[in-house]
Amino acid sequence: MKRTTSLNLTSGPILKTLSELALPIMASSMLATAYNITDMAWIGMLGAKAVAGVGVGGMYVWLSQGLASLPRMGGQVHAAQACGRGDYEKARSYASSAIQLSLFFGLLFSAACVLFIDPLLGFFQLDDANTYAAARSYMLITCGLLVFSYLNLTLTGLSTAQGDSKTPLMAKSDLYKISGHWDHYKEGMFVLGDEDKDKEVFALRPMTCPFQYYVYKASQKSYRDLPCRYGETSTLFRNEDSGEMHGLTRVRQFTISEGHLIVRPDQMVKEFKDCIALAQYCLQTLGLEEDVTYHLSKWDPENPEKYIGEPEVWNETEEDIRNILNELNIPFTEDVGEAAFYGPKVDINAKNVYGKEDTMITIQWDALLADQFDMYYIDEKGDKVRPYIIHRTSIGCYERTLAWLIEKYAGMFPTWLCPEQVRVLPISEKYADYAENVCEKLTANGVDATVDNRSEKIGFKIREARLQRIPYMLIVGQKEQEENKVSLRSRYKGDEGQVALDDFIADITEEIRTKEIRKIEVSEEK
């Protein structure tokens, strides 16, 4: 199966049709580009390997991504030049055109690989069994990416940032020496180069805050300009010990939707409360609000060398956070020695299936780094004043949150978060056209739907859809076709009988729009 139209995966070698190989490879590139999930070539290569079942599959994707990168790079150069001239409208136009050209050339070359290059080289000549297994592996990858993108799009809609940034993946060690990360966090960073031998030493970024400080410093700010809120969905790198690595819960490269709020001291309490409210809203939307505990992570006065700043500042900021949590009636525990080196924080933790607590969301109070970076604003008297900074995430690390969701829901995500929300099941080939029509109407209304047109018994297809945790199955036959209806089976209520197609579309679109989390009222069939 593929999305919106039928595809028999066991009909022959994968090269028999363009749709059986070119489209999945193209889709992986398009998803990576559209949602900026992670490195495009890595996603493309993983998709190609899964589809083809052989390591050389990555070669074509590297070639297609290389070709696709040329117009993208050119567009980025022109966009940067336009920004330098202050022509932001033209910069956006250049960037948009670059993405469209990149997609076009990537798709074109992917198709050329399949139609002309591979028949000569014969890398992807697979038997039927390998074709089916490889395609199923790819679908698992695609489903994960779709859930990932839904989380990202949801958070984008909630963003309170005044401007999103796109900051570099690495920087010179000088930047991290200013921030203090080089002295206090170097062991957790991927360092590129040798300080004793190399003229310049770089490091992959473990966080974006130093970069966004320079966005703030790009222009002088008045007290009227604050708060300044900067957001970014960023890829970060942290050199975790191999013994700490665990599935999606703890990885060395991860994606995070974070923000840095530069505020006046008198704005700090309100903005900090708003960040907690944003985190609580995200938890409620995902159905996770009852699964977390709150922690005030404090410095360790017995080990002052681990931190910057004076004890008075630490004691004052910790008391401010304590008062905020008490005012919001949030139960919390206090953890000594768990603060960041530059300030105390609120950690929102959850237990995984093994009983270990992981930090999911962090909101940090920073009264110190503005001095390190010489950040200031002009107050009403015309004097330079140091701002305060809030470091916040909304759902934390996407990978860890996805693992959390998988564990909590056992794969039965809320409908709005499911990569496949409806599967249409015709009882025989005679009703395939009606099934396709139903699917097209659902897709036109923003519902992720597929059609299972395989020549299998309807009971087999129902059981497979149920085991794959599909929220809704629409069974169609002669009566449904004649009356423009569908027979509805849901994971929530089981067999719900016949319903008008338009009524079902209205109900499911409302469920998705409101991000409703429906209660499962029937026991799972074995």
Image: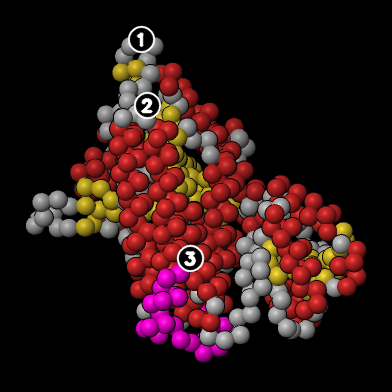
Residue 202 image position (x, y, % from top left): 21, 52
Residue 358 image position (x, y, % from top left): 49, 58
Residue found 49% across the figure and 53% down from its top: 35
Q: Which residue is mark 1?
A: 381
Extreme left residue here?
197
Q: Amino acid at mark 1?
A: Lys
Circles 3, 2 touching at the beta carbon (< 8 Å): no
Residue found 42% across the figure and 71% down from its top: 112
User: Left of 1 or right of it: where is 479?
Assistant: right
Question: Over which residues does the magenta segment extend?
Answer: 111-135
Alpha carbon distance from label 1 to label 2: 15 Å
Q: Which residue is mark 3?
A: 26
Could you say which disc has been placed on residue 387 in the image?
2
Q: Earlier in the sequence, mark 1 or mark 2?
A: 1
Q: Earlier in the sequence, mark 3 or mark 2?
A: 3
Circles 3, 1 touching at the beta carbon (< 8 Å): no
Residue 365 image position (x, y, % from top left): 43, 36
Whether residue 13 is visible here, answered yes or no, is: yes
Circles 1, 2 touching at the beta carbon (< 8 Å): no
Quadrant location of the C terminus in the rendered image:
bottom right
Is residue 206 within the magenta segment? Answer: no
Alpha carbon distance from label 3 to label 2: 47 Å
Which mark's residue is nearer the viewer, 3 or 2? 3
Q: Between 466 and 264, which is closer to the camera in this rendering? A: 466
Extreme front residue here?
116
Whether residue 58 is visible here, answered yes or no, is: no
